[in-house]
Image (cartoon, rainbow, N blue to C red):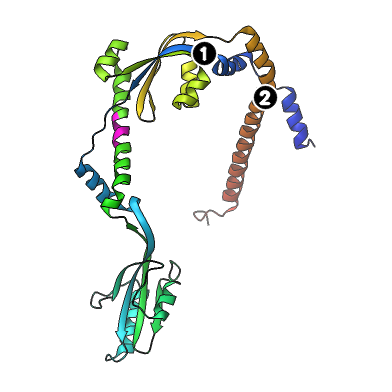
Amino acid sequence: QLSAQHVLDILKAGFYITEDEIDTFLKKRLSSINAKLITIQPEVNITEKELKDYYEKNKEKFSQKKGKKIKIFKIATDEKDSKLKAQKLFSDLKSGNIPSNVKPIFDDVFLKGKKYNLPEKVLEKIKNLSNNTKIEFIKTKDAYYLIYYEGEKAIPMPYKKAKTQVKNSVLEEKRGKILKKIKESISREKSLNLKLLKEKYNAKIEEIKNEKYVQLQFKYGLSPTELDELVKIKNGFSKPYILKDKVVIFYITKVIPPSSEEYEKSKKQLKPLLEDQKFNDIISMLINKLKMRQTLRLTIECCSNEQNPLLS
């Protein structure tokens, strides 16, 4: 039988990386471009009504504290049939039926660290409440206490305190929608030119001189896919990209390849690393496929071993 290492050695022996793959990778790292950077950064206006409406709809996003939402019922021991009433209430709560004829003395979010005018025994039992323990029954000298746990609940910050966070959230959401519309509108233009972008979209145009692709990626936050698209353009407009708070287009006027000396030196250094990376990626893909097949085989075996109820 072949060991796993033998299989890997056999695969490695027949493995190679193409010149095109090396060339594409090195172009991204070493080539530079001259281009015009076109940026469209729309102004986003927000009204007080928009802020308040967003806050009301999304209060849970602006919580300052979390606590236990509970109801506490109290039945005085000197009340007629107090024990029977307490037992009946306990039974109702246990069934999930909250009686409307018994008013709780506490119906709010219980916050840890806050002082409450409740017996020490009751405060201790509140600590035990969870999804697994929804009810606690306590008897003191003066009363029966029944505590009903409704779940964890966040207490939102007051609007004034949360206003800055609300504004940032509304700004991000509204700007995202505006940028998406601008991007879609530019993508529908039949013929792009600098004059159109400047006049119709109020675009700003800057010069990019002799900047490497990899520098552009880090400087403007281009994704690997967007960078790959940019590398393929020899001359002309790129797609519009939404980068942070603006729409960006590159108008490439010149691609400056690396010198032969720089290219060959980098190729010699990077080729073994690229081969290892590609090999590891392929092995990971094969392992994932084998795992999927194994899972499928076990599922089929399991199903075939089960008796079909329709045939019994």
The region drawn magenta spans: 174-178
Residue at horizontal 59%, vertical 50%? 302
Residue at horizontal 55%, vertical 9%? 257
**Residue 176 drawn in magenta:** yes
- Residue 193 pos. (x, y %): 31, 10
Tell me, yes or no, whether the two marked residues, 2 and 1, touch with CB atoms within 8 Å. no
The type of residue carrying mark 1 is Ser
The type of residue carrying mark 2 is Leu
**Residue 277 drawn in magenta:** no
Q: Which numbered tag is attached to residue 32? A: 1
Residue at horizontal 36%, vertical 72%? 115
| Residue for badge 2 | 273
User: Seen in the image, is 111 located left or right of residue 178?
Assistant: right
* Of residues 240 and 111, the one drawn nearer to the viewer in this rendering: 111
* Of residues 256 and 181, the one drawn nearer to the viewer in this rendering: 256
Q: Earlier in the sequence, mark 2 or mark 1?
A: 1
Front label number (2 vs 1)? 1
User: Seen in the image, is 296 located left or right of residue 98?
Assistant: right
Residue 191 in sight from this viewpoint: no
Q: Say above or below: 60 vs 238.
A: below
Q: Give the secondary structure at mark 1.
A: strand
Query: Residue 192 occupies which quadrant of the picture?
Result: top left
